[in-house]
Amino acid sequence: MSSSPQRRLHLNAFLMAIGHHEAAWRLPESDPNANLDIKHYISLAQTAERGKFDSVFLADSPVLFSNPERRPSGKLEPTIILTAISAATEKIGLIATASTSYNEPYNLARRFASLDFVSSGRAGWNIVTTAGADAAQNFGLDDTPAHRSRYERAAEFVDVSTKLWDSWEDDAIVADKDVAIHADSDKVHVIEHEGRFFKVRGPLNVPRSPQGYPLLVQAGSSEDGKDFAARYSEAIFTAQPTLDEGKAFYADVKDRVAAVGRDPEQVLILPGIVPVIADTEEEALELEAELERLISPEYARKQLAQRFNLEPEQLPLDEELPDDLPSEDEIEGAKSRYTLIVDLARREKLTVRQLIGRLGGGRGHRTFAGTPVQVADTIEHWFRNGAADGFNIMPAVLPSGLEKFVDSVVPILQERGLFRTDYTETTLRGHYGLSRPANQFAVEKDSTLVSAQ
């Protein structure tokens, strides 16, 4: 009887401009303009590829997300960044965020299929339902669409996108010069989709891409978000601050995946972690403290108040959160993150000032400072105890935090047999051990032929 292959970690590098800590740009080492420098992103991706990471990931939102007076706020469009990265790397996966709230399926499906071709099968789409009145007002709306409506639109958006990606069968292109036929028109399909939100005829003007279609990633942890993830996602980015919460989320989502008839092993759960790493614990704690000292408390309090639908004056810096905060049901945007922040503050009895310090690095993700061995121990403990299939690594400071992780933590994980020492696959799906999706039109045609017989 052969033994099953050893389960291996998956690591994704979440690249956030100068680093995930909001004060990272103020460190002497930091380039405050790196958020607009394509060479910066290429170098980060090459570092992650040197560390044999599965993928790099770029967040995005169709709005100026923070006050440009206080921190670098400009964002280049992520699929453009990843296209440039694809030419400077060979194996690492490339995941970009794109909103289903403020895009149209045809244009977005074409963009990601193109990225999958350009990168030879390394593209992934992080599916988000954008919240916030500021974003809505950039698209002719007065306020954010309701939470449930956003997820209903997202579900139809993904359905249309997968139909478009499948509108060319894998063997549609024959390129027969002798008979002057480039593609078999019987294998190129109109989709004739007409639903509540979209009416799309198709086919896509890009043939089926190397992965079939890009890897589908999702980052919502609300009830609607977990149901959506169970139906569509192949990798899930999540914020879980404690092991028990991580285990509960992991078990819940895997159960939901099985309940809709999908294989839980084909859905990876990757919590975010924000490690502050140094050769000694004392040095790591000193760097963490320095970053917290560089936070602007008044600006951070204003951001926190906006999340709670309060005025800043209602959150005194040296007092705990007020008892009468809005309930999750009263919050339309980022419900799961709202609950996570409130639970963290209540559980640890944090003042507003202390909460701001904790959120400055990871916005609710698990943050900790320590040595490479301590970081590796934490990763292994979560991985072996049913809380993660891998991790979304979110360095507090870039590029130094990613370099430190690659040079000091990855070798420990490799020595323990937890992480690859080299790439064995060429596509993002291959790195994650996920199957290439069948073409729905070819499957439908085969089923029809079998029925006719």
Image (tube, helix red, strand yellow):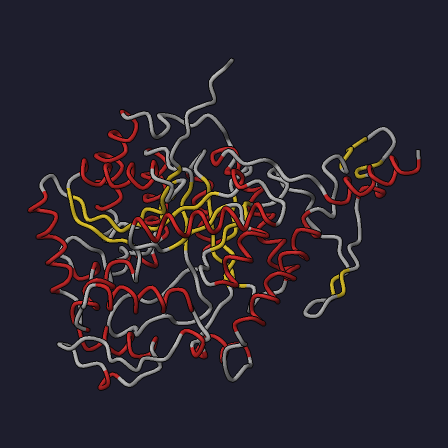
Which residue is most to the right? Answer: 453
- Is 148 above or below relative to 86? below
Left or right: 69 with respect to 235? left
Q: Position of residue 232 (x, y in %)?
A: 58, 51
Q: Which residue is painted at 74% across and 62% down in the image? A: 200
Q: x, y (%) of residue 236?
A: 46, 50
Q: Give residue 442's quadrant in the image.
A: top right
Could you tell me which residue is drawn at 76 percent across and 61 percent down?
193
How many marks can you see? 0
Q: Residue at x 34, y 59 (%)?
A: 36
Depth check: give the residue in front, 31 or 63.
63
Which image quarter holds the C terminus? top right
Residue located at (68% from left, 42% from top): 208
- Front in this rendered view, residue 404 or 393: 393
* 158 sits left or right of 356 in the view: right
The answer to whether residue 145 is left or right of residue 163 is left
Q: Please provide percent x and percent y for residue 227.
A: 55, 57
In this view, 247 is above or below 347: above
Percent position of residue 432, x then y: 48, 36
